[in-house]
Image (cartoon, grey):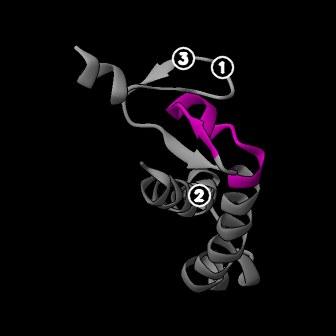
Amino acid sequence: MEDDMENEHICTNCSRVVPAPYRLNDSARCLRCSVQDRQLVRRSLTIAAVVGTFLVAINQGNRLLDGSAGADLYWKIPLTYFVPYVVATVSALLNARE
């Protein structure tokens, strides 16, 4: 029973009991608090903006420049930014997992 208590941690943000917290800013966090961490969100948004812009330029640049952009780009372009955001966030969380 004591081993179970040793394996549980308290989220420093919301006081939830978590078995394997994420270490962000030198504090233990649950998943919900981790994905809302300002520093992590800011970093992931920056990565998504840079990588997403390059990918849009590579994949859709010719259509945007010659004016032949169709309705399909209304979902392709946001998705092109969303994927790098998710990859950056998941990578950061995997590296912060205790």
Does the magenta segment cover residue 30?
yes
Disc 1: which residue? 14
Question: Which residue is nearer to you in this view: 94 or 20?
Answer: 20
Q: Quadrant of the N terminus?
A: top left
Horizontal and vertical percent for residue 21?
47, 37
Q: Residue at x 61, y 17 (%)?
A: 15
Disc 3: which residue? 16
Question: Which residue is nearer to you in this view: 51 or 80?
Answer: 51
Q: Amino acid at mark 3?
A: Arg
Horizontal and vertical percent for residue 97?
43, 50
For label 3, count other residues whose C-alpha is less than 10 Å away and answer few (under 14), some (14-19) or many (20+).
Answer: some
Question: Which residue is nearer to you in this view: 69 or 23?
Answer: 23
Residue 18 in which image quadrant? top left
Looking at the image, residue 2 lies above or below residue 41: above
Disc 2: which residue? 85
Horizontal and vertical percent for residue 54?
64, 82
For label 1, count other residues whose C-alpha is less than 10 Å away and answer few (under 14), some (14-19) or many (20+).
Answer: few
Mark 3–mark 2 distance (CA, rounded to whole Å) = 26 Å
Does the magenta segment cover residue 57?
no
**Which range of residues does the magenta coloring cover?**
27-40
* Outermost front residue: 2
Badge nearest the viewer, 2 or 1: 1
Asked whether the residues under the numbered discs 2 and 1 touch, taking CB atoms below 8 Å apart as contact, a structural biologist would say: no
User: Which numbered disc covers residue 96?
Assistant: none
Asked whether the residues under the numbered discs 3 and 2 touch, taking CB atoms below 8 Å apart as contact, a structural biologist would say: no
Looking at the image, residue 24 lies above or below residue 67: above
Q: Residue at x 39, y 36 (%)?
A: 20
Q: Earlier in the sequence, mark 2 or mark 1?
A: 1
Question: SS class of the residue under badge 1?
Answer: loop
